[in-house]
Image (cartoon, grey):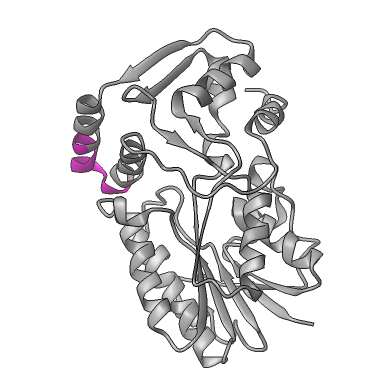
Amino acid sequence: MKKVLVAGSTGYLGRFVVQEFKNRGYQVRALVRNPEKFRQPGPWFAPAIDNLVDEVVFGDATKPETLAGVCDGIDVVFSSLGMIKPDFVHTCFDVDYQGNMNILDQALKANVRKFVYVSVFDAHRMMNIPSVQAHEKFVRELQAANIESAIIRPNGFFSEIGQFVARARKGFMFWVGEGYQRQNPIHGADLATVCVDAVKGSELEVEVGGPEVFTYHEMVDLAIEIAGARPVLLPLPFWFADGLVAAVGIFNPDIRDVALFATTLSKIDIVSPKYGTHRLRDFFMQCKSLGN
């Protein structure tokens, strides 16, 4: 039986990946920083994993002394480890780059066969964003290392737009620009299938998105329809959003980096190869069941 280490196992994608590996007969070892989060249900309908994993290693990827032996006996490492919101302690380079480097170091010591890593689709168009810089810095290190690797480059996740229905119900929705830029976000279960397929695949990089393409405006309209609400709609001009991001950065670089990601995506089409079966309408219907 093949053994896999999953880093980022308590995140939205990581939970679906744990489930997919188990469904295919792998023995799963989860690297977990927060024991409480490990025992909680997953975000945005991602599966609970406390009863799915075979082993748990509690460690902090930013602290290499807690990772000793984490890859011993492991055939494959999968990592979707990365910051999704500021913790005001670490930078994205601490986590997305150095945290993954610490895991890679353990993988090399343990002679792991393959390392599968989740970065960003069309990263070369977003290198003004610190988190994308951190992801790609690790990608370069991984591809240069003496280990087989695969880089997964997804579009946005369904979890990133999970708040749309709740916002519509609360009566206020905004976006940057005119909202006509296109994207095809992907459900965690569909993306997990692609990630696990990459273990036996030969592709060095895999670009992937969901089966449906939307403008931002269309996603907002769909959320409003499902919420059955009439919220106030407020498009923010690019000049205003860019100025706001710059002003926030003076006081808090961590929040600026998150906001910069949002404003950058609002200016470009991000349409990746279509994959999967999960529809955004069905996901929004699930989100409606969460209430406000």
Does the stretch in magenta take in 123?
no
Which quadrant of the figure has residue 291?
top right
- Seen as rendered, the residue at the extreme top is 230
Is residue 253 rendered magenta in the image? Answer: yes
Residue drawn at x 53%, y 18% is 221
Q: Give the magenta range.
A: 246-254
Number of callouts:
0
Task: Point out residue 191 in the picture as x, y percentages from the top left corner.
Answer: 62, 54
The majority secondary structure of the magenta stretch comes to helix
- Give x and y (percent) for residue 40: 70, 50
Kindly tell me whether residue 246 is visible in this rendering: yes
Name above or below for residue 191 compared with residue 53: above
The answer to whether 198 appears left or right of 244 in the picture is: right
**Residue at point 57%, 47% (across, down):** 274
Q: Is residue 113 above or below residue 195?
A: below
Left/right of residue 234 with respect to residue 36 in the rendered view: left
Residue 220 spot, x, y in % from top left: 51, 22
Provide residue 61's location: percent of width, then percent of height.
Answer: 49, 71
